Image: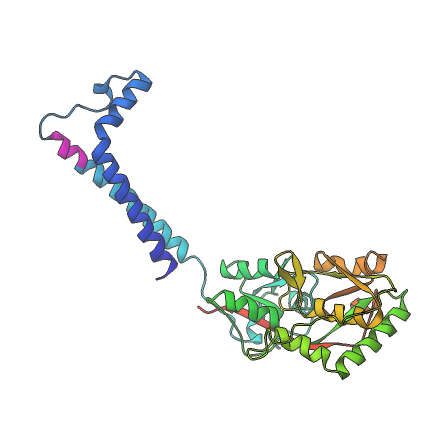
Amino acid sequence: MGKSRIFIHFFIEQIEILIGFFEKNIVKLIKLVHNYTNVGIHNVIIVPKEGRMEDIMKKLNRLIALALTVCMMAALTACGSVPENTVFSVDDLCGKKIGVQLGTTGDIYASDYEDLESGVFPEGYAGEASVIERFNKGNDAVQALKQGKVDCVIIDSQPAQAFVEKNDDLMILEEEFALEEYAIAVSKEKPELTAAINEALTQLEADGTLTSIIANYIGDETKGQFPYVSPEGVDRSNGTLVMATNAAFEPYEYYEGNEIVGIDADMAQAICDVLGYELRIEDMEFDAIINAVQSGKADIGVAGMTVTEDRLQNIDFTDPYTTATQVIIVRKK
């Protein structure tokens, strides 16, 4: 049953209850008005003579039925206010409202569509530039798509799959938007840490740990089958490594209860196990992560971050630890 039908069915039930209440309590209600307002009962309504009460109830029922009709029309109008999908390929992004998470790779790539001179528009295009709507969280962008406030959302493929699984009115276009590699952000002032993490990543990839961590979160047949567990007796004498992230990017980082879990969280823990650190994860807005690493509030930034020329001006990156794809989410209808 559609949402509009459920709403109308519920509304009719409530109106029927209301009508029954009036039918049983009309005289009591009139007397109640009289008692609290000192208005004579004859000024409230003409006291019905024999046979008149039925006429009054018919008029009351017609009035309530009219109100019900108006509310039903309003409900149907509201339910039909979301426009039909008009994005079926990357070529359809021109002139559209595109939702992205602020500061992400999707934001960076989509920003080209704000400039008619960027080269992404086809030759001879005479329309307007696209409008990029930026949201602090990916879920906020998805909700805007469902409400018809944007025409599509550009986001990483794995979070996109998680969103679509929870929203059966959305789908992912088969055509990929962009291919990217994720790496760990480290301050330019800490080249030794960058080198050490690269060595740890090489070891974790060689012994299959990194592959198992990713498989534990991605893949119908492997999901949940390879939870990462720190080995016993790890020497953590090197202190605490603070990881800055944005825990709204499933399956890379997200909350289970009060705990931040995901591919990036497990990978960072595995790196700390190799290098002898305690791990502490700090959740923050995505566009605050690089500043946190630059200022020393965090040692590393791990949040499905793509290496870009703009980011390299302010921060260093480790070797990539996984490859990801930017995709386009649209409404099914």
Q: Quadrant of residue 218?
A: bottom right
Furthest-front residue in view?
233
Quadrant showing the C terminus:
bottom left
Task: Report the residue at 36% width, 53% height from top.
Answer: 7
Residue 84, placed above or below residue 63: below
> Residue 308, can we see it?
no
Quadrant showing the N terminus:
bottom left
Residue 260: x, y in percent?
A: 67, 61
Residue 199: x, y in percent?
A: 84, 77
Q: In screen coordinates, is 276 left or right of 70? A: right
- Give yes or no for residue 84 being in the magenta stretch: no
Residue 231, placed above or below residue 34: below
Of 254 and 137, the residue lying toward us: 254
Residue 90: x, y in percent?
A: 58, 75
Which contiguous range is marked in magenta? 52-57
Q: In screen coordinates, is 8 left or right of 299? A: left
Q: Quadrant of residue 205?
A: bottom right
Furthest-left residue in view?
50
